Amino acid sequence: MRKTVFLVVTLLGVLFLNSCKRDIEVPAYLYITSPQFVTKSGEGTALQVITHVGIYINDNLQGIYQIPGTIPVLSKGNNMRVEIRPFIRRLARDGYVNYTMASSFIDSTVSLLEGKTDTVRPVFGYQSNVEFEWLDDFNNGTKTFVIDTSQSSIDTIYVTKNQGVGVDTTQYAFIDMGTAADPFFRIETQDAYQLPFDGRDVFIEFHYKSNVPFTLGLTEVYNGSEIDLPSVSPYETSGEWRKGYVYLNDELINAPTSAKYRVFIRTANGDESIHAKLYFDNFKLMYRE
């Protein structure tokens, strides 16, 4: 009797394990390489920081992933439509969001087969309807920023190019705050720009390197008055160039329809042990038409 019970229990166990094995679905795999970003004439630098992407397979969201990396997927078949959307981290905001200024990458020839890995190499660019309201990469040796002398202890914005110092091999803007006690400055764009107020995303892109914090924002010019609308205050960058994505829609809520906007940067250094130096490059003020 005991032997019979043992055999029955053993048989049930084997059947249960075989059932579990059949329930385990082997995924296919996607390897997503680091993306390439391409620009056309009039769109400025192609240097971006896109470390995360949203993956859609046949229009179904799979998730948001860090790349480069290998991603398991349960959808399988030949000629699968894979859409990859670029995600960025905005300054002063948490998490990663779809960068609406950039286009998605779509490959409709991906083979997703059980246990196999297919490679996708995304190439992004700006959407065709992105309007670049202001660009300044300092490459022609000039600058569109001016010093607000009433709020500055400096008198010069340098445009220079030293090998190994810039974010790329081209020219950049450099501000040396000197060694005097409590230096400060405020600079702004010479021109004021008309921006949309209807909810379309408005962004500033720029590169920066600084050993002191600073503030960047918009100056609203309306009805003979000017009001600073601070947006972000990046920290020092430990000697490295950083890419900044600044989302400006909050500053444009309830804005007067005839208002225009300058971009400003300001800072003050109260630490005499720090010789404050700030570097800037590749400014873009843009929105979707």
Image (cartoon, rainbow, N blue to C red):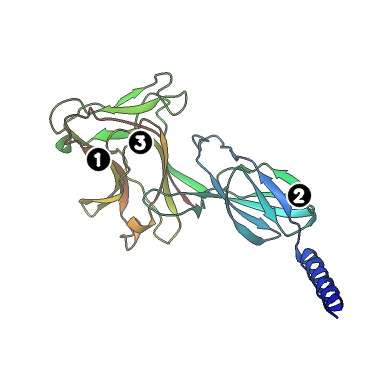
Extreme-left residue of the structure: 181
For marks 1 and 3, the one nearer the N-term is 3
- Check whether the beta carbons of the residues at disc 2 and disc 1 lie within 8 A of each other: no
Badge 2 crowding class, 10 Å Cα cut-off, few under 14, some 14 to 19, many 20 or more, is: some
Front one among 239 and 8: 8
User: Residue 266's mark?
Assistant: 1
Pinpoint residue 273: horizontal percent, then vertical percent: 19, 29
Q: Which of the two discs, 1 and 3, sits closer to the camera?
A: 3
Pinpoint residue 177: horizontal percent, then vertical percent: 22, 28
Pinpoint residue 172: horizontal percent, then vertical percent: 38, 27
Q: Amino acid at mark 3?
A: Thr
For marks 2 and 1, the one nearer the N-term is 2
Element class at badge 3: loop
Image side of residue 25 versus residue 172, left or right: right
Q: Quadrant of residue 63?
A: bottom right
Q: Amino acid at mark 2?
A: Val
Where does label 2 land, which residue?
110
3D distance between C-alphas at marks 1 and 3: 16 Å
Q: Is residue 212 above or below residue 126?
A: above
Q: Which of the two discs, 2 and 1, sits closer to the camera?
A: 2
Pinpoint residue 26: horizontal percent, then vertical percent: 76, 57
Q: Amino acid at mark 1?
A: Arg
The N terminus appears in which quarter of the rendering? bottom right
For marks 2 and 3, the one nearer the N-term is 2
3D distance between C-alphas at marks 2 and 1: 49 Å
Task: Answer whether residue 169 is visible to the viewer in this image.
Answer: yes
Where does label 3 land, which residue?
237
